[in-house]
Amino acid sequence: MRTFIAIDLSPEIKDQLEALVNSLKPAARNIKWVARENYHLTLKFLGEIPEHRVEVVKSVLDEAVKRHHQFNLVMKGTGSFPPGQSRMRVIWVGVSAEQELVTLQQDIEESLIKKGFPREDRPFSPHLTIGRARVPEGQEKLRKDLEKFSQMEFGSMMVKEITFFQSILHPEGPEYKIISRHGLP
């Protein structure tokens, strides 16, 4: 099963992000926008794992959350990957959080490595993907619109739990199902 670990966002933040996406949609036709119900902040993408490993991940997450506390998360600013290039592939909203976010992510990463899961190839770069370019061209208007929102805040929330998701791929887009939730003290 295809899985990942993430912070599910509050309905209020999802509302703000949906409004942002709706305002950006007319700027570029070649973007596959993320559906409102799929907005999340990925902490660790596990990819395909055998079903018998699900309990191992749940156990790691149960232990990791005990070592951390709730923290504030702010969604702020917009941009794209790759940075500084004229052809955007990923459109994102920035994430501003206390050091606790990075510490939590590193703890999960290291704990999973000890259980035989592979290390992430890239360093953790907290962001929320809101769209992906199918064809990276004709993006001048979108780039200008993203610059307008580069300092805007899209809400904040207390992170009280992390969620272990299954991702089921469909032609119309992914469906995310919650496997388990793990509360932070």
Image: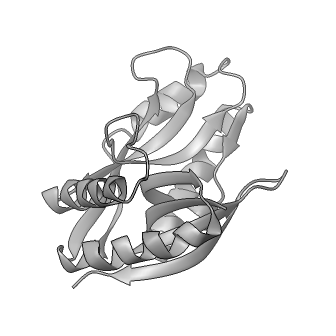
User: In the displayed image of the protein, which residue is found farthest to the top?
Assistant: 86
Towards the viewer: 82 or 116: 116
> On the rendered structure, is 50 left or right of 96?
right
Q: Residue at x 65, y 21 (%)?
A: 136
Q: Residue at x 45, y 71 (%)?
A: 56
> On the rendered structure, is 17 left or right of 72?
right
Quarter of the N terminus within the rendering: bottom right
Say if 4 sits above or below 64 in the image: above
Towards the viewer: 28 or 114: 114
Say if 181 sits above or below 73 in the image: below
Measuring from the top left, give residue 45's x and y in whole percent.
49, 52
Say if 142 sits above or below 44 in the image: above
Q: Is residue 9 something one can see in this rendering?
A: no
Measuring from the top left, give residue 66's x and y in whole percent.
21, 80
Towards the viewer: 140 or 135: 135
The color scheme shown is: one colour
Q: Quadrant of residue 50?
A: bottom right
Measuring from the top left, give residue 99's x and y in whole percent.
14, 56
Measuring from the top left, give residue 57's x and y in whole percent.
44, 69
Q: Residue at x 28, y 77 (%)?
A: 63
Quarter of the C terminus within the rendering: bottom left
Q: Quadrant of residue 39?
A: bottom right
User: In the displayed image of the protein, which residue is found farthest to the right?
Assistant: 171
Q: Is residue 91 something one can see in this rendering?
A: yes
